[in-house]
Image (cartoon, helix red, strand yellow):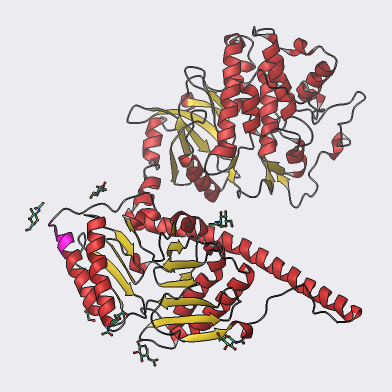
Amino acid sequence: MHLFLFLPLLSLLLVPATSDSFKSYTCDSMSIFSSTTTGNYTANSTYQSNLNTLLSDLKANSTGTGFAAGKLGTAPNEVRGLILCRGDLNASSCSSCLSQIFTDILSSCPLYKTAIMWYDNCYVQFSNLDFLSLPDNIPLKLFVKKKNLTVDQTRFFQDVSQLMTQMASVAISNSTKYFATGEVKNFSTELSSIYALLQCTTNMPKSQCQSCLQSLVNDLPGYSEGKDGAWLVGIYCNIRYDTIPFYNGAAMLQIDSASLSPSLSPSSPPGVNDGKKKKNTAAILAITISLVVAILSSTTFCICLHKKRQRQREKLISEMINPGHNKENIDSFLIGLTTLRAATLNFNESNRLGEGGFGAVYKGILPSGEEVAVKRLSQCSSQGLGELRNELVLVAKLKHKNLVRVVGVCLEDQEKLLVYEFLSNRSLDTFLFDKEKRQELDWTRRRSIINGVARGLQYLHEDSQLKIIHRDLKASNILLDADMNPKISDFGLARLFPVDQTINVTRRIVGTYGYMAPEYAMHGRYSVKSDVFSFGVLLLEVITGKQNGGSYDAEMGEDLLSSTWDHWTSGTITDIIDPMIDGPVNEIIQYIHIGLLCVQEDLKDRPRMSDVAVMLDSNTISLQAPSKPAFYLRRGGGVSGYGSLNNMVPVSQNEVTISEFKPR
Ligand SMILES: *[C@@H]1O[C@H](CO)[C@@H](O)[C@H](O)[C@H]1NC(C)=O
Ligand SMILES: *[C@@H]1O[C@H](CO)[C@@H](O)[C@H](O)[C@H]1NC(C)=O
Ligand SMILES: *[C@@H]1O[C@H](CO)[C@@H](O)[C@H](O)[C@H]1NC(C)=O
Ligand SMILES: *[C@@H]1O[C@H](CO)[C@@H](O)[C@H](O)[C@H]1NC(C)=O
Ligand SMILES: *[C@@H]1O[C@H](CO)[C@@H](O)[C@H](O)[C@H]1NC(C)=O
Ligand SMILES: *[C@@H]1O[C@H](CO)[C@@H](O)[C@H](O)[C@H]1NC(C)=O
Ligand SMILES: *[C@@H]1O[C@H](CO)[C@@H](O)[C@H](O)[C@H]1NC(C)=O
């Protein structure tokens, strides 16, 4: 049994006590973990009669221990339940608490298949789901009192923690009830005693009870928010402290505060000679620092663990609630190879739309009549099956009007096929870099294309659940629908990156020179800011109607960034605007300005996509002056900041290899 806590969940469940007693309930309580409901039963149904019988059986079975858990009936009318009385209650008090809570839960949560209710003295939980098989102790509820502690909190929680740790040993020493009460005496003149209680359900070995309690104890100071009383309840164990007595009888364990290890205090007793004092202070400081470091690193570790476990938990519970749900989701995305062969006339040359990154693209018509574009990833593609599956999961979740919709995927017979919606107007480059077709792109269209791409990219970077870096944004990856709305395609290169880590060093460079930020092209370091760079290049291409040739080699084409910068600094910027566009000059210059901000050499200077979106939307905002773009070719040759062209290779060939070197 893994024992853990997850902070976000608990903070949602924090219940301030209105009086000195704690009382609360949650109907449909599995919805705590998942958005799905377990539903309702109907009046006088089998489920209802099973539930009633179960509750009275549990009550009968709890005699002597105050605990029972079990199930009754057969699916779909199977009910599971758990009850627990506080360990200090005598049999009659336990029995009356249970009778009362049963009545109360059934009237507070009428017809709910799943519910949970807590009283000061007992609690009950039932569900059609097998919550008893959950591998972890889920902390379900945190009750805190309203009053803040007025005493030294650090010392207070040190004492509580030490008391509870010793109480845990007392609790497991008796297998009839894993239960203990405790008291810290003589805490201070202000606070004579601290009272505590802890208890496990008895359906587990002693060692598990101990670790269940310990994990709650460790997290208690963080949860209790410095209040003068708190109760942290999990499925299998719970702990509670208060500054006033709240349990029956004398504490099973009593400790004088003076006997607990003293807190670290930087003040030395007076009268110590100077040399010794310094030494002491240094030692204490060293201890304090190492403690702080230990606490910080363990906190970070715990939070990561919590997040991971929380995800596992959510998956588990959503699977319990909705068996086969996730699998179905993936299945619904799979399209059979036979279907796709038929749809593309067996990948007929005449259906071929073109060659994109990683493979050829074919037009197809599915049996439903839907037109699709099928990307056939080439065998020699560097993208492995695992990566492809990643892409599938990623793209399946990404929905935005400026992203190409993924219809399905096929992983059969060595074939790796991605099926996208078909967009009749193909890609942006077919318009932009074609003399004839470029005329169809007036300023209104170009502006809406730039804005749409910005929104799609912002979604990938900042708004989607998965933070995604595209890494190969370019005109041929912008598809246009019948109304010329832009949609970003090919986020197969995108990969998940941890939320707290914005810069990854890739082992392999993908992407297209000309659009690649210097730090990515040369060191393989990509981040959202390298996508912003590509966006800047794209924006300038849309406005000038010229392709950025890749600035490394004059033969590859015009160096758009250098020429834009030259015109910008010499005050002739209107010269670079595509003569075929007819918009308000101020607005177009504003756009160029934004483009230049995106292609700045230092990635820290480049705006984020959300900033870009704001700038594009506003014509009153005053923009920062751009600094020189990356790859600016000085007169007389040489690339700014990066030495000669021959140095344009990754630092270490072992760590970085270039698999897609495809200058446009
Ligand atoms: C269950 O019943 C309650 C009222 O008793 C109602 O508020 C709730 O919406 C119902 N839930 C479902 C899923 O039908
Ligand atoms: C359920 O049974 C009770 C008692 O037998 C009856 O009074 C009530 O009308 C029934 N309810 C339904 C919905 O059948
Ligand atoms: C009550 O205890 C009996 C005997 O141990 C057991 O067979 C039965 O399943 C228990 N009932 C429940 C609801 O747990
Ligand atoms: C059980 O405990 C309650 C409350 O502490 C007390 O009033 C009652 O007399 C006790 N009953 C027995 C049988 O000891
Ligand atoms: C308790 O302390 C918190 C901050 O620690 C403060 O915001 C709150 O107002 C205090 N409440 C009372 C009742 O003093
Ligand atoms: C264990 O706890 C039960 C109930 O509180 C009590 O009756 C019994 O005497 C205890 N046994 C030991 C060995 O302490
Ligand atoms: C703790 O307090 C009690 C009275 O409440 C007193 O008799 C005892 O001496 C105190 N212990 C210490 C160590 O101060």
Q: Residue at x 70, y 70 (%)?
A: 291
> On screen, 82 above or below 523?
below
In the rendered structure, does residue 140 fall within the stretch colored magenta? no
Q: Is residue 78 above or below residue 206?
A: above
Q: Position of residue 135 (x, y in %)?
A: 41, 68
What span is colored magenta in the figure? 44-49
Q: Is residue 96 visible?
A: yes
Residue under the point 67% across and 79% down = 262
Answer left or right for 159 relative to 93.
Answer: right
Label count reads: 0
Residue 138 located left or right of residue 166: left
Query: What is the quadrant of residue 600 in the picture?
Result: top right
Where is residue 13 drawn, in percent x and y?
44, 57
Asked whether residue 71 appears in the rendered view, the answer is no
Q: Is residue 114 toward the left or the right of residue 357 in the image?
A: left
Q: Is 320 on the left-hand or right-hand side of 71? A: right
Q: Tell which of 369 and 290 is nearer to you.
A: 290
Residue in view at x 30 percent, y 61 percent: 129
| Rendering quadrant holding ligand 4 | bottom left
Q: Which residue is nearer to you in this view: 568 or 50?
A: 50
Q: x, y (%) of residue 558?
A: 77, 20
Query: Front-most of 317 and 37?
Result: 37
Location of the N terminus (image quadrant): bottom left
Q: Which secondary structure dominates the residues rendered in magenta?
A: helix
Q: In the displayed image of the protein, which residue is found farthest to the front?
A: 189
